[in-house]
């Protein structure tokens, strides 16, 4: 720490000592090779400082449907201003910010959608994710009080099951969160299918499987696989239509229930828990892993797939976004692959493998096997 005297505390590592030295920064800014690194580091630091403004500019672009409007073709500021009922000079500032974020670009007086802007609209679930962020934004408005645990975050209300299955009895609330999860499931399923070997499995049971989006994706990739969906009674009715539309009705079984209150049905030789563990505290997760162990036959496999903390190598997406998000939910925790592996081991699983994701902000996986 920099002391009032300007001296640096003796326990600091050399990198931090250099970082605290104004002379070091002055030297770096003059030396050709280092100048480049110093500038990139400065820009990265400013991104951290201004991230909340970037997110709010993005939210305005989304809520005013400006990116959507540009999918019909390039437009001048005036047309966008009239479309969104925003004064033209303020619209110019917003669009310029969008250009700074590389979501749009101006050419010959017209605003065009960039590849990044188009990707934002195309990646399933991204827009819905941004549109539900105001809840988290409000929860973090006093971050000091938030981290001291002195606030009552609203986010838990978005996920009514976090304080017990009884909280999730309202089908309308369940449908709201299920749509958000199903929208973003495509990428999670894609990466899980690349990480985990499903060959040799005869029946897969997806516990906390929402309205069946993950099972539909795995079922399409593995045509011989029988599928069981287990989730709360208010959630599972949404799966019937999905399975029918995907032509999977004949090989799916839907079981309503709560893993907090009852045993999991037997019959599957693989159980998946996709984006389920991070919603819950250690006690609930320990109970759930034991229930999965009991429901599997000897040799049966368990797959956990969700965004995971980087642990000893903190990850810029999961250790900031997901860890703080799950903290705001009040019950959950973003665990590292190693922590999840240890919990599987404590529940009796063997052959535990931690499979780091290709896109850690989408998912990573941990697998284990019930011993023979
Ligand atoms: C974050 S969502 C994930 C849904 C889905 N697996 C996915 O990745 O899209 C968590 C799921 O766990 C379910 N869930 C929560 N508590 C449950 C419980 N006690 N019993 C069964 N399912 C539960 C929720 O209804 C929800 O569908």
Image (cartoon, rainbow, N blue to C red):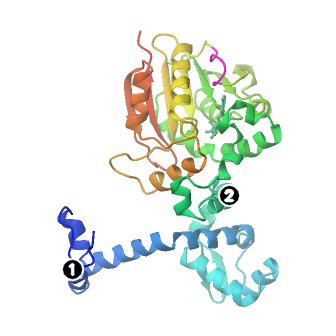
Q: Can residue 361 be seen in the rendering of this structure?
A: yes
Placement of the C terminus among the 4 image quadrants: top left
Nearer to me, 241 or 311: 311
How far across and how far down the image is residue 43, in percent? 40, 76
Residue drawn 65% across and 59% down? 133
Q: Main secondary structure of the magenta part?
A: loop
Q: Are marks 2 and 1 in contact (CB under 8 Å)?
A: no
Q: Is residue 262 magenta?
A: yes
Nearer to me, 261 or 273: 261
Q: Is residue 297 magenta?
A: no
Q: Which residue is mark 2?
A: 135
Q: Is residue 247 above or below residue 89?
A: above
Q: Residues within 10 Å of mark 1 (few under 14, many from 20)?
A: few
Q: Earlier in the sequence, mark 2 or mark 1?
A: 1
Q: Which residue is mark 1?
A: 24
How far across and how far down the image is residue 159, in percent? 68, 43
Q: Residues within 10 Å of mark 2 (few under 14, many from 20)?
A: some
Q: Is residue 181 above or below residue 291?
A: below
How far across and how far down the image is residue 331, in percent? 58, 40
Residue 182 numbered tag: none
């Amino acid at each position: 720490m920099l002391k009032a005297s300007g001296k640096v505390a003796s326990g600091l590592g050399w990198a931090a000592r250099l970082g605290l030295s104004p002379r070091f920064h002055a030297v770096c800014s003059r030396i050709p090779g280092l100048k480049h690194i110093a500038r990139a580091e400065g820009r990265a630091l400013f991104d951290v400082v201004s991230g909340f403004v970037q997110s709010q500019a993005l939210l305005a672009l989304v809520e005013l449907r400006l990116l959507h409007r540009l999918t019909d073709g390039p437009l001048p500021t005036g047309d966008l201003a009239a479309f969104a009922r925003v004064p033209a000079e303020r619209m110019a500032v917003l669009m310029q910010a969008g250009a700074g974020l590389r979501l749009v670009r101006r050419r010959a007086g017209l605003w065009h959608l960039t590849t990044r802007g188009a990707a934002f609209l195309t990646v399933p679930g991204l827009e819905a994710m941004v549109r539900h962020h105001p809840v988290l934004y409000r929860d973090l408005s006093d971050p000091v009080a938030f981290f001291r645990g002195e606030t009552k975050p609203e986010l838990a209300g978005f996920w009514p099951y976090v304080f017990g299955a009884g909280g999730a009895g309202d089908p309308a609330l369940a449908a709201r969160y299920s749509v958000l999860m199903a929208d973003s499931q495509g990428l999670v399923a894609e990466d899980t299918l690349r990480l985990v070997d499903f060959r040799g499995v005869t029946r897969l049971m997806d516990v906390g499987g929402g309205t069946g989006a993950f099972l539909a994706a795995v079922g399409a990739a593995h045509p011989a696989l029988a599928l069981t969906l287990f989730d709360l009674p208010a959630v599972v009715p949404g799966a019937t239509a999905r399975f029918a539309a995907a032509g999977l009705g004949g090989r799916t079984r839907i079981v309503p229930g709560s893993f907090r209150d009852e045993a999991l049905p037997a019959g599957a030789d693989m159980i998946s828990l996709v984006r389920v563990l991070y919603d819950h505290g250690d006690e609930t997760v320990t109970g759930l892993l034991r229930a999965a162990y009991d429901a599997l036959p000897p040799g049966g496999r368990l797959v956990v797939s969700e965004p995971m903390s980087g642990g000893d190598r903190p990850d810029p997406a999961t250790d900031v976004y997901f860890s703080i998000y799950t903290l705001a939910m009040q019950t959950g925790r973003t665990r590292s692959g190693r922590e999840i592996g240890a919990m599987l081991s404590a529940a009796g699983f063997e052959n535990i493998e931690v499979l780091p994701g290709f896109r850690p902000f989408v998912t990573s996986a941990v697998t284990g096997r019930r011993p023979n």
